[in-house]
Image (spheres, helix red, strand yellow):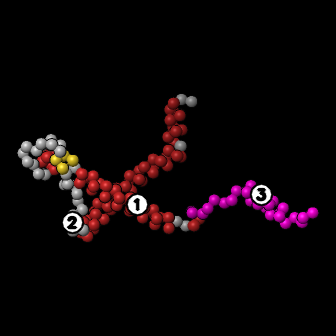
Amino acid sequence: MSIINEFREFAVKGNMMDMAIGVIIGGAFGKIIDSLVKDIIMPLISVLTGGGVDFTQKFVVLGDNPNNLQSLDELTKAGVNVLTYGNFITIFLNFLILAWVVFLMVKVINRIRTPAEVEAAATPEDVTLLREIRDELKNRPQA
């Protein structure tokens, strides 16, 4: 089999196409969730907490600051070594909110599913047959 035929067989397999579709849908869904967190949830949290949720400007200067610069942008442009812990905190909080939103969405989707979709696996035929044999042996008269 030539390499082109092997590649065609690999690329057209159902699993490969399913994965590609999943990645595309996941990327679009990720943008929706990211917008939900940034544009709706974070502003609401900011209003509830008095506007102090954005930690991106929290930092510690880790070296010489000869010009006594105060803003993060000025410090990074000047090449001063800065520990930007506030950015990490903001990204971490966004992650927690994002994970919570996804968790809630999965719970809602699982509730919406019909019972046929969530149906438990049927008992295998051999197990059913063994149970019938067991029950017949129990019902046999003792000699």
The CA distance from mark 3 to mark 2 is 67 Å
Residue 112 position within the rendered picture, expressed as x and y whole percent measured from the top left: 50, 67
Q: Which residues are magenta?
A: 117-143
Q: Main secondary structure of the magenta part?
A: helix
The quadrant of the image that shows the N terminus is top right
The CA distance from mark 1 to mark 2 is 25 Å
Element under disc 2: loop
Observer able to see residue 32: no
Q: Disc 3 or 2, which lies upstream in sequence?
A: 2
Residue type, mark 3 in image: Leu
Q: Answer above or below: position of 6 versus 66.
A: above
Q: Nearer the viewer, mark 1 or mark 3?
A: 3
Observer able to see residue 111: yes
Query: What label does residue 102 carry, if any?
Result: 1
The CA distance from mark 1 to mark 3 is 44 Å
Residue type, mark 2 in image: Gly
Q: Disc 1 or 3, which lies upstream in sequence?
A: 1
Disc 3 crowd rating (10 Å Cα; few below 14, some 14-19, many 20+) is few
Callout 1 touching callout 3 (CB < 8 Å): no
Residue depicted at 19% across the width and 51% down the height: 59
Query: What label does residue 130 carry, if any?
Result: 3
Residue 87 position within the rendered picture, expressed as x and y whole percent measured from the top left: 24, 52
Q: Is residue 38 left or right of residue 72?
A: right
> Which residue is nearer to you in this view: 11 or 83?
83
Q: Is residue 58 left or right of residue 39?
A: left
> Which residue is nearer to you in this view: 30 or 143?
143
